Amino acid sequence: MKKLLQVSLLASAVLVGLSGCKEEQASAPTAVEAAPELTSFEAKSAYAIGLSMGRYIGSTLEKQQELGVDLDNDTILRGVKDGFSDAGQMSDEEIQTALTAYDEHINGLIETQAKEQAATTLEEGKKFLEENAKRDGVKVTEAGLQYEVLTEGEGAKPAAEDVVTVHYTGTLVDGTTFDSSVERGEPASFPLNQVIPGWTEGVQLMSVGSKYKLFIPAELGYGESGAGSIPGNAVLVFEVELLDIKAADQPEAKPQAPVAE
């Protein structure tokens, strides 16, 4: 999300007309302002640069509008036009000050929104785990990990230092899938002590051939910060099948821990 906001400095400095003229794009060209002829190399290049830049920056500004920041398109376009000449109404220092203040304001709104979302997610997660713990077949460890045995295997159980090979699907409590080796069609192998605590504890409970469902509280997962598409304070639900165990010093094992995309 920070990468998205970093473009705001560039946005205000180089934004072209296309990002602020969606209504004009949707309507047919008038006799006063005909559509450009895109027949030459120069014309195609110029238009492509402008269109690409406009769409990218326009999309960025739309996301910032969701935070309550709504910039006037006409003012943006006037600044762009003035930027091609010496008619600017602000000095370089004033521009830098304004853009820095804008970025700080946007990032402040982002942080506030993230904290509010994390607080909501935390409460929702607590309620989910409280109800889930009451279901038949769900067990709760001392650390707070919840698990459900779907299939019980008869093989060995891994130690934390071992490299395990598993198939898994990870979802949020609403059923949204954020990672799945099953969908990729390739099992994952990784040292069990190099993943989130909920995995390290939960997979050690399993024998080779077992299939468990792990319900991982945020403190045993990615915590308040979250990861990738996983929001802060999210409870994680993993369906895990333990396929194999290898000692950590065996070179053929290729670690590939689950990652939130």
Image (cartoon, rainbow, N blue to C red):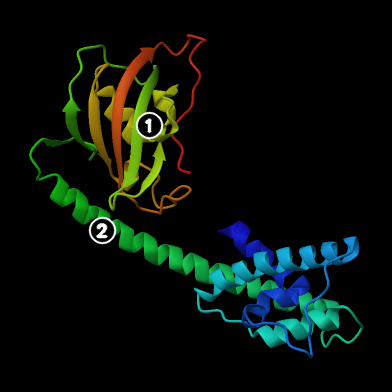
In the rendered image, which quarter contains the N terminus? bottom right
Residue for badge 2: 124
Examine the rendering and report whether any part of residue 91 can be seen: no
Label 2, secondary structure: give it: helix
Tell me the number on the disc at residue 218: none
x then y, percent, for residue 157: 27, 16
Kindly identify which residue carries mark 1. 182
Tell us which disc is closer to us: 1 or 2. 1
Q: Position of residue 55 (x, y in %)?
A: 66, 67
Q: Camera-side residue: 29 or 8?
A: 29
Q: Residues within 10 Å of mark 2 (few under 14, many from 20)?
A: some
**Residue at x 73%, y 88% (from the top left corner):** 30
Which residue shows up at 38% across the image and 63% down it? 117
Image-based side of 7 in relation to 153, left or right: right
Query: In the rendered structure, which amino acid carries the disc numbered 2?
Result: Glu
Judge whether 78 appears above or below 137 on screen: below
Q: Quadrant of residue 12?
A: bottom right
Q: Earlier in the sequence, mark 1 or mark 2?
A: 2
Residue 141: image quadrant is top left
